[in-house]
Amino acid sequence: MMLSSATMSSTSTTTVLLHCSSSTTTTSTSKQNSLTPFSTTRRVRTCSSLNQTFSRNNKLLYANGGNRNLNNIRRRRPISPIVMEWQDCTVKMDIDVPVSTAYNCYLDREAIPRWMPFISTVKVLEDKPDLSRWSLKYRAFGQDIEFSWLARNMQPIPNQKIHWRSLEGLPNRGVVRFFPKSPTSCTVELTVSYEIPQILTPVSSALKPLLENLLVRGLERFTKVAKTYT
């Protein structure tokens, strides 16, 4: 039976649409045979194209660590640096010596072990007199405590201020201030700041009272040394 071109076109269109929607229809054997290879080939090419696109997307996705890894990265919090704890100790004492005498006596760094009970040695570097090496030795909390550091004496203010800071070793800094009370007396104020050593972290709450007590004892000894200073 012969079909007109319009009828063939309509039949072809109907056949293709029905074939793509996977519906069952009754058509001539010749039409089915001619359409099936075309539809199958087109479907295979389409699936192949989708697979290639999916593969490319997967490669890009896993190149970036995947959604799961990216989400983990977004949720990850930045690691905070360890912040070491510092303590400050300040003590002061009235001394019956002129402010200039107290200042000059304390300016002699190598003499500091004479009055500070926990400082064992202070050695000024011959080639760099603004630098000095300090060593600390003291028994406390059931153990022998030993530390050392290199310190720089900052520019002093005559009869008013002496201050320093460590450059290496035990992190610390300090300042001694002198306040005249009368021509023959003055007030000496000492402040020491230090980073709590790791081995003393468990007893950090008891460390500050201990050091304050040692500084008071040091100034009491300094009073006696300053009175004999010439």
Image (spheres, rainbow, N blue to C red):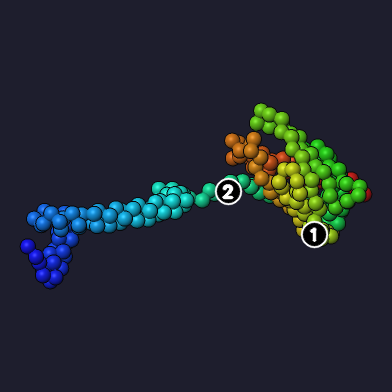
Total count of labels: 2
Specify whether 187 is left or right of 201: right
Name the outermost residue toward the top. 142
x, y (%) of residue 27?
10, 57
| Mark 2 → mark 1, Cα distance in angstroms | 38 Å
Q: Nearer the viewer, residue 96 or 176?
A: 176
Amino acid under disc 1: Gln
Q: Residues within 10 Å of mark 2 (few under 14, many from 20)?
A: few
* Residue on which disc 1 sits: 160
Name the outermost residue toward the left. 1
Specify whether 145 is left or right of 202: right
Single out the mark in the foreground, 2 or 1: 2
Specify whether 203 is left or right of 44: right
The residue shown at (71%, 33%) is 145
Image quarter in which the N terminus is found: bottom left
x, y (%) of residue 187?
76, 54
* Residue on which disc 2 sits: 81
The residue shown at (77%, 40%) is 148
Q: Secondary structure at mark 2?
A: loop
Q: Nearer the viewer, residue 4 or 184?
A: 4
Q: Secondary structure at mark 1?
A: loop
Name the outermost residue toward the bottom. 6
User: Would you place residue 212 above or below residue 5 in this image?
Assistant: above
Q: Is residue 27 visible?
A: yes
Q: Nearer the viewer, residue 151 or 54?
A: 54
Contact check, label 2 and label 1, Cβ < 8 Å:
no
x, y (%) of residue 109?
84, 47
Looking at the rendered structure, which numbered label has been put on residue 15? none
Q: Residues within 10 Å of mark 1 (few under 14, many from 20)?
A: some
Label whose residue precedes the other's in the sequence (2 or 1): 2
x, y (%) of residue 78?
51, 51
